């Protein structure tokens, strides 16, 4: 059995494709916030695909497809990751404040609130003017506030890492500006907001992503993910790396080829498609 730990809207079509290739498949949403699994949660699995970056899979008699814990930190520990991204050439949004994730401060312009280190939600919250941050319900853990660079568009790079190699699958621009990161509407409307567009300097973004993935691949693990950045004029600003397939993905292609891309050769990822 292929056991997939994921939000269901991130792996739409994948279970059907695997079943068409003869696999029994189960999708489980348990463990999204990193809560530990029991042996019962993995019973019957021969292959486990972990699309929940905070989740640690217990040892067992099955093949695990997952980012390593070091790779997972690229998404879970945003504070240390942003400085690594600067070293490979990405611009960084300005840090307006280092604070608690339940700071009482309000802002007159839109900002982004991020936890400094690993936490259960590992989300970047878009904070509108005047919003009361304690409404998010976070504990008193370290965080920071980034400016909203007000980008011309976002830039996205989808990739697969497996067996010490990586494959860039797709580069794109999008006029979406983070509306789904508002506390009250998170994930409700994306990807209907905005439209897909051509990047003004695709080569520059490709060069940055290549330098980044040259580093990320050294951290190990077999997983698919996405680099997100903001384009403003000639500058490309680092947002984050997701070490998982993001929400609202829809898979098209052979389930076996997808498995091969994560267990044999990441170049196989070019033979299937994820639509967002």
Image (spheres, rainbow, N blue to C red):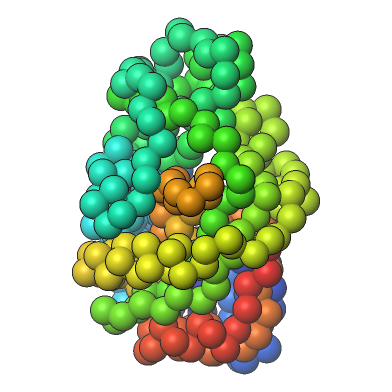
Along the line of sight, the residue nearer the viewer: 212 or 46: 212
The image shows residue 53, relative to residue 160, as above or below, that is: above
Farthest residue in the top direction?
104
Tell me which residue sits at (43%, 64%) in the image: 204
Any part of residue 149 in sight: yes
The C terminus sits in image quarter: bottom right
Along the line of sight, the residue nearer the viewer: 214 or 4: 214
Residue 25 x/y as whole percent = 59, 76
Residue 40 x/y as whole percent = 43, 60
The image shows residue 170, relative to residue 105, as above or below, that is: below
Residue 50 x/y as whole percent = 44, 64
Any part of residue 54 in sight: no
Farthest residue in the right direction?
192
Residue 141 x/y as whole percent = 32, 23
Along the line of sight, the residue nearer the viewer: 53 or 228: 228
Tell me which residue sits at (70%, 60%) in the image: 196
């Amino acid at each position: 059995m292929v056991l997939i730990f994921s939000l269901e809207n991130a792996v739409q079509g994948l279970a059907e494709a695997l079943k068409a290739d003869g696999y029994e498949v189960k999708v489980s949403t348990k463990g999204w916030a990193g809560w530990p699994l029991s042996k019962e949660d993995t019973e019957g699995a021969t292959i486990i695909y972990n699309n929940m970056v905070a989740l640690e899979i217990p040892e067992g008699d099955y093949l695990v497809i997952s980012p390593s814990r070091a790779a997972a930190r690229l998404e879970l520990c945003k504070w240390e990751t942003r400085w690594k991204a600067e070293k490979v050439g990405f611009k960084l949004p300005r840090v307006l404040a280092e604070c608690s994730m339940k700071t009482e401060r309000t802002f007159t312009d839109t900002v982004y609130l991020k936890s400094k280190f690993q936490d259960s939600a590992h989300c970047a919250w878009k904070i509108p003017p005047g919003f009361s941050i304690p409404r998010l319900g976070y504990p008193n853990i370290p965080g920071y506030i980034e400016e909203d660079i007000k980008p011309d568009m976002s830039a996205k790079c989808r990739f697969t890492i497996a067996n010490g190699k990586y494959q860039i699958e797709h580069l794109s621009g999008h006029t979406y500006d983070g509306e789904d990161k508002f506390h009250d509407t998170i994930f409700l409307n994306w990807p209907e907001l905005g439209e897909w567009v051509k990047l003004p300097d695709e080569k520059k973004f490709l060069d940055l992503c290549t330098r980044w993935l040259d580093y990320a691949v050294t951290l190990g693990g077999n997983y698919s993910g996405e680099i997100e950045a903001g384009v403003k004029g000639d500058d490309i600003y680092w947002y984050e790396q997701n070490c998982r397939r993001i929400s609202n993905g829809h898979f098209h292609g052979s389930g076996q080829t997808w498995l091969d891309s994560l267990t044999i050769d990441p170049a196989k990822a070019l033979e299937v498609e994820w639509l967002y």
